[in-house]
Image (spheres, rainbow, N blue to C red):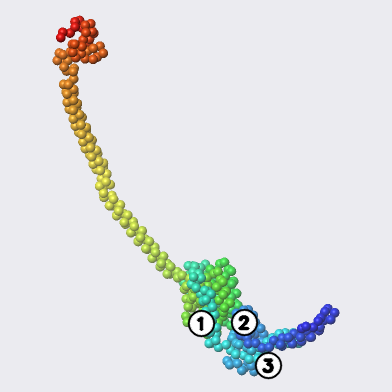
Amino acid sequence: MTAKTSPEQPLPIRSVLQMVAQWIGKLGTVWAEGQITELSSRGGTVFLTLRDPVANVSARVTCPRGVYEATVPRPVDGARVVVLIKPDFWVNRGSFAFTALEMRPVGVGELLARLERLRQVIVAEGLANAERKRRLPFLPGTIGLICGRDSAAERDVLENARRRWPAVRFKVEPVAVQGPYAVGEVTEALRKFDADGEVEVIVIARGGGSLEDLLPFSDESLVRAVVACRTPVVSAIGHEQDSPLLDLVADVRASTPTDAAKKVVPDVGEQLTLVRQLRDRGRRVVTGRLDREESWLAAVRSRPSLADPVREVERRAEQAEALRDRARRSLSSSLDRAEDSLEHLRARLVALSPAATLERGYAIVQHPAGDVVRRAADLAPGQPLTVRFADDRVPVVVSEPPAS
């Protein structure tokens, strides 16, 4: 492949193909694992396609009949094998293929060990955690069903679901549920339903089978496709004892397709019974509340204030009259006592008043300024004075000096 060429000095295509064949022939042999598909034979050669179990990749392999027949048990379509292959380039046809030099079937024990390793990876990544899983809607409008074409699993899901809720709607996507095309078809149907806005739940259903038959539902690419789904996924693969890895990551795991129908769709009879029970319970609660309120109202109405409201008014009026009479008596008594006290004070005042003395015939002599004359020696002839009597007064003048 290191020959120098140019538009003026090209190589013949046979030389190019021979150089490619020589380069590929130097690659040697390698052990490879895959799943057999498109198995056929012509003459002394067996032709098959070796498909990758995870990715959508395959390669053509030619196997001498002796090598194929020496493999025990003899491989069939869908079997997983480990093959010692070497690359070959056919110059005459310009095609590439692998030649099988030795073939060994992958045993059940080895498959189980690989599945266990993948299970541990899934658990370690948290893909099986309950917190990640979503709840199913109570009554999905449309259910997407992925199953085999005209399979018993399809009949079980549809019949049981419609028996429980006759109005339920399904969109069915028939796919291969075993063999080399199962993973690709199931994954494609899963993505189709997940992109459909009407589908609220996706059910992946398959009947029972051997470990090899159920291997597609433990495929890592399918498992991760389920994890990436935004729509809740129900896994209903095989029977109760079957446990493909799809069960770990699905939002709900059903033991059988019939169980999937029961988990996804509520029973109309059970719901009607529940509604009736709740209605009866609500009626009892409301009736009890009304009875309690009626008893309370009757007790309130039986109280004197409400039973005979006029009597209460009369009683209050009697209390008001009694208080008024009491106030009147108290005020009258207070006035009487005050009047007696006033009369007593007036009598004392009259007794002590100079006017009373004047009433008895006495008089008071006063200077013009009002000062009382207490001694005659204080007077002088010609000095004006006033003589005050009880009812009036008279002015006088001192005519003589007072006698000693």
Residue marked by disc 3: 43
Q: Residue 272 falls in which quadrant of the image? A: bottom left
Residue marked by disc 2: 52
Q: Are marks 1 and 3 in contact (CB under 8 Å)?
A: no
Q: Residue 291 falls in which quadrant of the image? A: bottom left
User: Residue lying furthest front in this view?
Assistant: 404
Q: Position of residue 70 (x, y in %)?
A: 61, 94
Quote the CA–CA distance across marks 1 and 2: 24 Å
Mark 3, secondary structure of its residue: loop
Q: Is residue 401 above or below residue 92?
A: above
Nearer to us of marks 1 and 2 is: 2
Residue marked by disc 1: 208
Residue at position x 58%, y 77% from top? 221
Sequence-earlier tag: 1 or 2: 2
Q: Position of residue 359 (x, y in %)?
A: 16, 15
Q: Quadrant of the N terminus?
A: bottom right
| Amino acid type of the residue tagged 3 in the rendering | Gly
10 Å crowding of disc 3: few (<14), some (14-19), many (20+)? few
| Amino acid type of the residue tagged 2 in the rendering | Asp
Q: Quadrant of the C terminus?
A: top left
Residue at position x 19%, y 5% from top? 400
Mark 2, secondary structure of its residue: loop
Mark 1, secondary structure of its residue: loop
Sequence-earlier tag: 2 or 3: 3
**Front-most of residues 151 and 205:** 205
Nearer to us of marks 2 and 3 is: 2
Residue at position x 52%, y 79% from top? 120
Asked whether residue 161 appears in the rendered view, the answer is no
| Amino acid type of the residue tagged 1 in the rendering | Gly
